[in-house]
Image (cartoon, grey):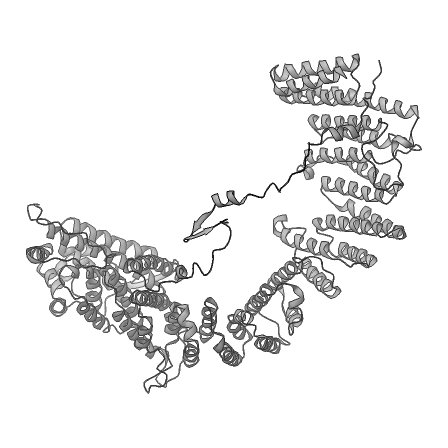
Amino acid sequence: MELEFRRRDYGATHKSQFLPRSQTQKHPLSSTLASRDQQAKTVRGRDLHFFDPLRGLDVNASAEENVEDTCISIEAVTQDLIKEWKSLKRILMQRFPVSKLLLCFTQSAVESPSALSHPEETGSEQTSLEEPAKIISQHEYIAKVHELRDGINSAWQAEDRVTSLKLSIKVTKLLMDTTVLRFYPTVFVIVTDMLDMLGDMVWERIKQKAELDIDGTVICALPMISALKQERLAITGFAKLVLFENFSLACKAPSIIIFLILPTFLCLSIGLSLYAHSYLELAILPCWRFLINQPMEVLDRLVMMVRGLADPLTSLYCRLYMVHRMQKFGFCSSGYLIKCIKDIEDVLAPVLVDKEGYSYITDDKKLLFSLVEPAIEYIMKCLFLTGRQENNVLGILEELGFGRNKFQSSYNSSHVSILLHYLLKELPSELVSSLAMEILDMIRCSNDCSFSQVLNYRLLGNRLSEGKSQEGFLSSLIDEVIQAASQYQSLYDYLRIMDAYVDLMLQNKMENHLDALLDDIVSLARDKFLSEEEQASLQSIILKLLSHFENLQEVLPLNHFIEILDLMSGTSKSSVNMHLLNMGTRNGCICDSTTVQLLFEVSQALYDATDFVNIKDDDNRQTSHLISRFVEMVDYGAEMERHLLFLAECREAFNGIHELKETLVRSSNTLAVKALKAGKKHINFVKSCLAFSEVTIPSISSPTKHLNLYLETAEVALLGGLISHSDELVMSAVEYLENVVLTDGLKSIDIDSMASVICKLCSLLVMIPGNPEKGVMEILKSIFSATRSSSWATLRVKVKIFCAIMSLLSTLSQDNLPYHSANPEIIGNELLFFGDSSYKQELVSCTQLVLSELLDAIEQESSQISRGNMALEACNCISSALVMNEKVKELCLRLLETAKGCLGANDRYIESTKKSLQLRYTE
């Protein structure tokens, strides 16, 4: 009994699958007024019929909520400063690495605690000038310092307070030595951590002695004293008397009692140096909270004491530690911080100028200022955090001489440049705007070697960009800045300054100033090769221009813009070109020929700067995507020949970009469709487009994309009525399919995608008329042969393709095909071979051949689950394609039994297949 194809009525099937539809009186997404009232929400006391959580809040309703309170609590200030201190220590250790340095110190400075044979003499700081020096590595030095720390801790735990104090005095001596300047920040961090440890141990012991009697009896439970609290411990009456007595007992050695209570006498009696005295008293500074009500007396005395340190580096770091310990003291006051800043300015003044009054930079000065820079930044940050807490920032500025008293006789615009920089950095943005002209005058007058004046000009621009600047003074301010920047003969300095003011010019629409800026850049850069630093600054300016404007047509008319682009090179130019391409392709089609030419040159520069052969795909993916996007967005309108020529130029210019080749083929096919819509007069142009695509496709490496593009181009040819071109393209796809081999270079083939493309090809063959001269089933047999012999297709994929071929054969056997080509001139196979019995016989013959291979593939599958699913898929395909005669019925039952043996009788897929077969039996 021969096979027979089932008859199909595609029109009836299509209608039966329609969902029932009825006309409605209202839109299904609309709601009644009552339901909206029920869903009304109350927001800020107002009833809303609908509240969208994604909608922006009402500006007027939330105005009072957005008012920022400039005052901050003391707890917040202290918490911020604790974090800043930890960050500062990391910066000091990382910014000045000295891992390979050999350090030269006196022998006594690095001796171990066990070398203290006469501990009663260690308090003396008098060392012999002839004491021999010792050269050690940083690692050895730090190890010995840590040994001293362990000695202090061990002595304290052993109740040997005297040794602990004397070792602490020895530790402070390390901060006197500035032999190796770059190592000083590291020493400072290590030593101050040890002093903090000592201060905490003294604090806890005093508190313990105040709470407990000698026999351990609790005298009074003191409230927790924390540096995070504003309130000082309030102790009155008998409790205060007991605390004071036990405070004395807490420090058993008479010398320590003197040290804690009478520091001035200590300095005179036991001969401690000012360094040791200052650091040790700062270490136990929080303990004064047990004894005094007015901490300002202690603060003023300590500020005066530190003034006795003459060395700029050591005195500034001592002030840094003092500011840190003041936070532990639990007392924040801007008064002593103002004194510290003024003292720092006085200490640095002699360093800035020589005896003749000249200010110049040397390597030693440069190193010194780099060492003190983090300390100044921290102190200035503490000052303004405290000023905000006191709500007295303006008062602080006046105290420091940065106020508006410009017309007073004592007014001085000149300040140490490094102090001015960090003051400007910490100043609230609203004050920067209101004092902008005064700050500019200070920067102009403060041109010393402590800090670059260029960076101060730049910082002012950046700070002004942060807040809302008043338009009234901006014009005159930027005029003065441009004038000041023009005095620098270096293009790099000019660019660094003006880069900070570009955003201000753009936001306030200052076209004249922007033109002046671009004129100056061209004038300074003409006939000059730009360095990497100059390239980076120029790149920043151009990127700000590109980010501000919406489209490329607004940027290109800018004064000297193209000339400035030509000045750039290297990575900076590549970055600018990427932004230009992105900007040019984000707003729809590119129709202007000038813009197309510019972006083509930009793309060429990007392509030439990128090695698409040797680098990974991830590295050039963005460049490839932008260039492909540019080519896709170009539209020459009615000049279709010019557009095709452009595509050819792109293929030649960017032949290393695989992604672009796919874009070129699709653009060419789009052009062909556009020409077909314009009428038959462009048929020759359509052939040119098809030829362009056919030549380009073979260079695409991805097998899936390769096949897909052949099929898309064949569809275009079919739309144009070019059947021979369509046949050639489909045969090219089949020939490529026959030559696909699973080699090392094609291990990443997506086999399922390949199978989907072949199924798509089978769907396309429904519309393509058969060729009686070459054989009606020539293409179909080639697909079958390529699939059967392929090395990349698994058995599961082969079954899927064989089922698709069988469905195609069943469709071709119908009297009315389900769909046809959009070109009415192309005749379908049902008309072309109407009444031709040999055509039907050939379809049946092909079906028998495919069916045989289908069954063999199922039997060869080793996986039980896969074989069962494949059997069910084949069973459904056969029952759908063929009339259910005895032979087909027997075949389907055999496949069903195979599935049961592999999947089990209760499998849901098997149950649905049974129901489908029963329906087929009744037809």
Q: Quadrant of the N terminus?
A: top right
Q: Is residue 753 visible?
A: yes
Left or right: 170 as drawn, with respect to 639 = left
Left or right: residue 487 versus residue 579 is left
The quarter in which the C terminus is drawn is: top right
Residue at 80%, 27% in the rendered image: 9
Identify the residue at horizontal 27%, vertical 65% (top origin): 323
Give percent across and percent down for residue 138. 34, 58
Residue 440 is situated, as x and y percent measured from the top left of the image, at 44, 78
Q: How many marks?
A: 0
Q: Quadrant of residue 869?
A: top right
In the image, residue 629 lies at what x, y percent?
Answer: 69, 54
Residue 627 sits in quarter? bottom right
Position of residue 350 in the picture relative to residue 290 (left or right): right
As drawn, 530 above or below 107 = below
**Residue 394 picture quarter:** bottom left
Question: Relative to the observer, which residue lies in front, 316 or 661?
Answer: 661
Residue toward you, 439 or 856 = 439
Can residue 135 be seen from the camera position used here?
no
- Comparing 733 with 122, the one in front is 733
For residue 240, above or below residue 721: below
Q: Is residue 339 above or below residue 157?
A: below
